[in-house]
Image (cartoon, rainbow, N blue to C red):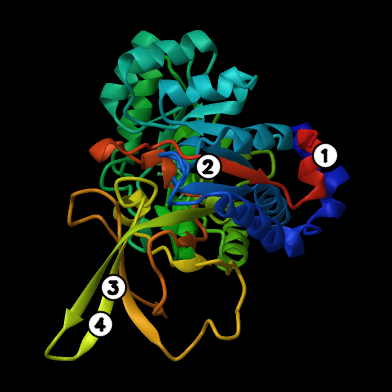
Amino acid sequence: YEDLRSVGKTLGTTVNHGAGISKQLIGEALKSRVEAVDPDTCDAGDEDAFFVADLGEVYRQHMRWKKNLARVKPHYAVKCNPDPQVLRLMIELGLGFDCASKNEIDTVLNLGVDPSRIIYAQPCKTNAYVRHAAQAGVKQMTFDNTDELYKTKRLSPDAELYLRILTDDSQSLCRLSQKFGASLDSTAELLELAKKLELNVVGVAFHVGSGASDPKAFIKAVQDARFVFDQAAALGFNMHTLDVGGGFTGDDTFEPMAAVLSASLDHYFPPHIRVIGEPGRYYVSTAFTIACHIIARRTVTDATLGTTSYMLYLNDGVYGNFSSIIFDHQNPVPRVLKCGNDVLYNVRRSGYDTPSQAEYSIWGPTCDGIDIVSSSCTFPEVLDVGDWLYFEDMGAYTKCSATRFNGFTNSHDVVYICSEPGAKALLGL
Ligand code: PLP
């Protein structure tokens, strides 16, 4: 990862140059696209939801990572958002990749990434995928149980194995430890079996849960990893790498979380131990904004209370890119993008915030009652069919888990912009 370091050196000075113009560029991209759509005459599909992705934001997050977690070499968790332009930029930035399946491995390899930059970070793998990974030269992989060790011995005996340990993920958005991770009272047995099978265990991996909020989870996990490193040394293994997984959010908790993790790493692991991480949402969450079209409206009057509210139906919902509501426990915030002839992205218009506000609920396009995007929000009482809403922070665990339920597409256009000169230079834009 010498290239990672040199890229940082050359481009470090450009960090944040584009932060100020990011909103402006996103606004321009949203505006030109929605203004081109006339809902009364457009072809079916022209009014589909679409993303605007600011690759500059991915770049800024990377520089922020390097500043705060210099010791941890990021291996982006492809599952979070396998967008090809995002992956291209990450390759140029020198990241490694955490892949969870054959498809993810192939996606990254087909972009020209050396197999040594990939970790197959899934402790319970498909036989054929293990064979495929071995043939492709992907050696790093995780395990947390005896059956997987026997499988590895048969299908990828030269693998470089990471023993994934259990963590306290109780303060995270998406808990993983009920499914994966060896408890500390089973690690000795696993290491002994690996020794007997003459497998190469090179390190320990953990994940404190996606969307983690308690830095103490990292401290405990690093301490536990130290314990397993020592166990392994006693059995004759020479572990050289610690994988601290993902769990980082891109919000203001990142810096303090990173400070706690860095201090624990330095306390428990000498500098010659290589440290990698598997961040997902941290890198992409804020980079993607989605625009959705209002396809239908129902007016709901309550004669007793004398009130009127509205149900708005969008052309995207929880079976689509808002799958994050169900799977990732998110609450995307609706904002008005286009109302009548006015484009209102990131703008407060006088006269728009009028006293005549109304209550809206926002629904997806499928037949299912579960398909609700927001149960209550307040906007001026003028929103109607043909208008557009937008939602920020839609880059993580959104389009990757969208379905085609009810025949709707799960492949939406992405309009790319780039607010960082450094990222533009790397991508040749
Ligand atoms: N690594 C593994 C093994 C995971 O299961 C996940 C998410 O589920 C990640 C990394 C990425 O996590 P995050 O998006 O919280 O950084």
Question: Quick check: is the Cβ at mark 2 less than 8 Å away from ligand 1?
Answer: yes
- Quadrant location of the C terminus in the rendered image: top right
Q: Mark 4–mark 3 contact, CB under 8 Å?
A: yes
Residue wearing tag 4: 308
Query: Quick check: which quadrant has ligand 1?
Result: top left
Distance Cα–Cα, label 4 vs label 3: 7 Å
Disc nearest the viewer among 3 and 2: 3
Amino acid type, callout 4: Thr
Residue wearing tag 3: 310
Mark 4, secondary structure of its residue: strand
Distance Cα–Cα, label 1 vs label 4: 53 Å
Disc nearest the viewer among 1 and 2: 1
- Residue 425 — which label? 1
Residue wearing tag 2: 278
Residue 292's place in the image compared with 300, above or below, is above
Distance Cα–Cα, label 1 vs label 2: 25 Å
Determine the residue positioned at 42% across, 52% down.
208
Residue 150, position in %: x, y?
30, 16
Closer to the camera in the image, 172 or 55:
55
